[in-house]
Amino acid sequence: MLKALIVDDEIASVRTLELLLSQFARDVEVVDVARSSVEALSKVDHIRPDIVFLDIEMPGGTGFDFLENCAYRDFDVIFITAYEYYAVKAFKFSAIDYLLKPIEVEELQAALARVAKRRSSNFDGRKRYYALFENLKSILPSKLVVAVGNRSEFIDLKSVAYFEQHQKGASVVYTDGSKLGIDNSLVSLEEVLDSKNFARANSVQLVSLEQIKRIGRSGTVDLRCNISITASPEFLSSLMEQLEMYINQKQ
């Protein structure tokens, strides 16, 4: 049984979440409720929850204030938010679970399933929250959180030349030539990077448009960091179109 703390100043939202959890998440027990970030700080050390359902906007301090000032952090967070689109993108980039108000049952169950999986594998995800704070400072997030074994790492997309698929995950290839093996699949990376100027060069490589210096007729892609890769024929036209759009947007 997972112990949950709900941190939300809206009584109606708290009651709705409690009802949904009682009906559709029998393995989660709501042990307490806090109406502010200050109250949550006073309760979390005593409760030591497994999950904190955390509202963002509250009187007297935000949900982020709670996280930044919380000494005990051995819990997973599921944010409850009505934030606009750009902030939701920041949550996705930071690999943070969130639920949009009004809460959908399927989304709640999916978020809880991810939490259960992380906790059963002793996954240390605290770096995700640091990345979230960084990403929320900008309308266009640049910190991407990835999984590396039982921990999370965040990478600066500006320093990435391309991602390359492996049998059990992928590698981040940085502009200095160094590599980082990650558990994320190339398909999952492509989905989250659809608006971050990364495009397929071939079936196993996702390249940064920002790093492309030139594309040869034969498909050779020369990067500004003195690395070259090859675009396969089925992806070459699309890659050139996306590069042209990227260049036009910058002008």
Image (tube, rainbow, N blue to C red):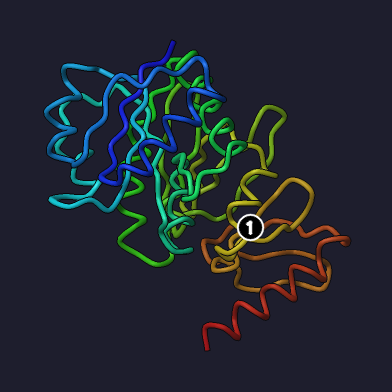
The residue positioned 69% from the left and 34% from the top of the image is 166
Q: Residue at x 14, y 38 (%)?
A: 69
Amino acid under disc 1: Val
Query: Please, is residue 234 above or below residue 4 in the view?
Result: below
The spot of residue 232 in percent (x, y) is: 83, 58
Rendering coords of residue 99 (x, y %): 48, 44
Q: Which quadrant holds the N terminus?
A: top left
Q: Circle 1 sits on which residue?
A: 207
| Figure disc tally | 1
Q: Position of residue 205 (x, y in %)?
A: 70, 50
Residue 55 location, x and y as percent? 32, 45
Quarter of the image for residue 76 reads top left
Task: Determine whether the residue tagged by mark 1 lies in a helix, strand or loop.
Answer: strand
Q: Is residue 125 left or right of residue 20?
A: left
Residue 42 vertical position relative to residue 50 in the rendered view, above or below: below
**Observer-nearest of 136 and 56:** 56
Q: Residue furthest right?
A: 234
Whether residue 39 sits left or right of residue 76 in the image: it is left
Left or right: residue 124 versus residue 40 is: right
Q: Residue furthest bottom?
A: 251
Q: Nearer the viewer, residue 21 or 155?
A: 21
Q: What residue do we see at 70% from left, 44% from top?
A: 187
- Viewer-nearest residue: 184 or 60: 60
Few, some or many residues within 10 Å of mark 1 (<14, 14–19, 20+): many
